[in-house]
Amino acid sequence: MFFIWVISLAVACACVALHYEMLNGISIVLPKLPIPHRRRVTVAVLGVLVAHILEIYIFAAAIYLVEVGAEEEQLISGPAANSAVADNEPEALQVSAVKEPRATLFSNAAYLSFTTFTSLGYGDVVPVGNMRILAALEVLTGLLTIAWSASFIYVEMNDVWPRQR
């Protein structure tokens, strides 16, 4: 359990640092771009989107590495892993002993990361066991960085778009 906390905090700190550096870089580059002022907001939005996608894939890589590193314990559960389980058991609790190919594991990790980071959470692929700690920190990191991005874009819009009177 200590290991998952260390990994979770390290990944969250790495994503916050990445986000800071991306926003800082965007704020330095935007005024220097030889494009109309209104287009700069679009560049800012696209830059923030790239930052979020990178952060999501950092979390996905952590989920994948922890899942692959777990010896016999499955830490994410989804429909592909649950095909041979009794119908009366809730899907989030179903665990299969069948090992999935690594590509499928990374695909599930990326999907779980996208739905968790954005706090969308469909529930078809869910973290189980200690992986829930990493998922909880991912939600918190996602909410904070998305709010940070929204305020950054708001400030950039105020700087770029003159107020209409």
Image (spheres, rainbow, N blue to C red):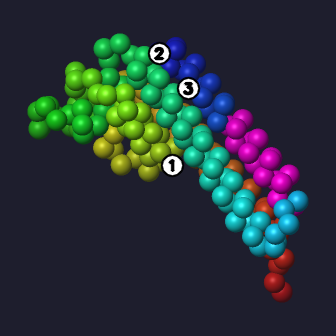
**SS label for mark 3:** helix
Decide: few, some or many residues near mark 2? Use Cα within 10 Å; few <14, some 14-19, many ≥20. few
Q: CA distance from mark 1 to mark 3?
A: 17 Å
Quadrant housing residue 108: top left
Residue placed furthest toward the right: 32
**Mark closest to the chain's N terminus, 1 or 3:** 3
Q: Which callout, 2 or 1, points to the residue nearer the camera?
A: 1
Q: Which residue is mark 3?
A: 8
**Closer to the observer: label 2 or label 3?**
3
Q: CA distance from mark 2 to mark 1?
A: 25 Å
Q: Residue at x 62, y 24 (%)?
A: 10
Amino acid on which disc 3 is placed: Ser
Task: Return the x and y of residue 104 as percentages of the image width and height.
Answer: 34, 34
- The residue that label 2 is drawn on is 1
Answer with the quarter of the image where residue 94 lies. top left
Image mark count: 3
Numbered disc 2: secondary structure: loop
Residue of label 1: 118
Q: Is 19 placed left or right of 107 in the picture? A: right
Q: Which residues are magenta?
A: 16-31
Let me know if residue 130 appears in the view.
Answer: no
Query: At which x and y percent is residue 24?
Result: 80, 46
Packing grade of label 3 (10 A; few <14, some 14-19, many >=20) is many
Residue appearing at x 64%, y 36% in the figure = 15
From this view, report whether residue 32 is shown above or below residue 108.
Answer: below
Q: Is residue 110 left or right of residue 56?
A: left
* Residue 28 highlighted magenta (yes or no): yes
Question: Compared with residue 139, is residue 84 higher up or lower down, i.e. above or below?
Answer: above
Q: Residue at x 47, y 45 (%)?
A: 114
* Disc 2 to disc 3, C-alpha distance: 11 Å
